[in-house]
């Protein structure tokens, strides 16, 4: 009986992991689309857009890995400490996922805006310096 139970649990865990992976992939695709749209709307040059997108892709992959690890750890902890049912586990994990994704999205948007502003300021400074040189 114990063996059977263990096997069942393992199968369920695998299924959950697969589901999570699928969800993450979907979210990633959505995020990427949003990013691309934002980039296209704001920036004019092609080189900057491509580099930024590549960077974002790498970041997303890293985050994915981190998230997966975190989720697995949490799952293991839950299973060991509190003898929770799989239904509760799924709900908790989903909630966590949603929360994490929301937080990350907000952070990213803020970061991007700052970067753009900095670039503009640098350009302005350069122009001013050039003018001063001409005056001298």
Image (cartoon, grey):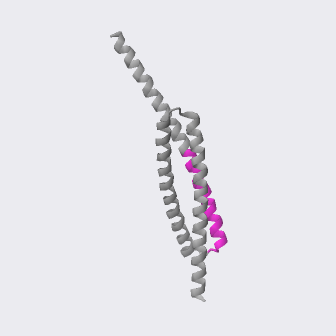
Which residue of the protein is positioned furthest toward the top in this rendering?
Answer: 135
Q: Nearer the viewer, residue 106 or 45?
A: 45
Quarter of the N terminus within the rendering: bottom right
Please check the rendered image and state whether residue 11 is part of the magenta-colored stretch, yes or no.
Answer: no
Q: Position of residue 62 (x, y in %)?
A: 47, 55
**Residue 122's x, y, as percent?**
42, 28
Q: Specify the segment rendered in magenta.
A: 84-107
Question: Where residue 96 appears, x then y in whole percent?
Answer: 60, 59
Residue 71 placed where, x, y %?
54, 64
Residue at left offset 53%, top offset 34%: 43
**Vertical position of residue 14 compared to residue 23: above or below:** below
Q: Is the residue 56 above or below the residue 13 in the image?
A: above
Q: Nearer the viewer, residue 81 or 86?
A: 86
Q: Residue at x 65, y 69 (%)?
A: 88
Q: Quadrant of residue 92?
A: bottom right
- In the picture as drawn, the residue positioned furthest to the front comes out as 46
- Asked if residue 90 is among those painted magenta in the image, a careful observer would answer yes
Main secondary structure type of the part rendered in magenta: helix
Tally the marks: 0
**Residue at 53%, 44% in the rendered image:** 108
Q: Which of the pair 39/6 is nearer the observer?
A: 39
In which quarter of the view is residue 17 placed?
Answer: bottom right
The residue lying furthest to the left in this view is: 136
The quadrant of the image that shows the C terminus is top left
As drawn, the residue found furthest toward the bottom would be 1
Q: Residue at x 57, y 77 (%)?
A: 10
């Amino acid at each position: 009986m114990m063996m059977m139970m263990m096997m069942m649990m393992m199968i369920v865990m695998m299924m959950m992991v697969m589901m999570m992976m699928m969800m993450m992939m979907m979210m990633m695709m959505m995020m990427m689309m949003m990013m691309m749209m934002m980039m296209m709307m704001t920036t004019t040059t092609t080189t900057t857009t491509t580099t930024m997108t590549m960077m974002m892709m790498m970041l997303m992959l890293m985050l994915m890995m981190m998230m997966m690890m975190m989720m697995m750890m949490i799952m293991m902890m839950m299973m060991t400490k509190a003898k929770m049912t799989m239904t509760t586990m799924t709900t908790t994990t989903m909630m966590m996922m949603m929360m994490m994704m929301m937080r990350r999205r907000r952070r990213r948007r803020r970061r991007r805006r700052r970067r753009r502003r900095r670039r503009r300021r640098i350009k302005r400074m350069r122009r001013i310096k050039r003018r001063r040189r001409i005056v001298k």
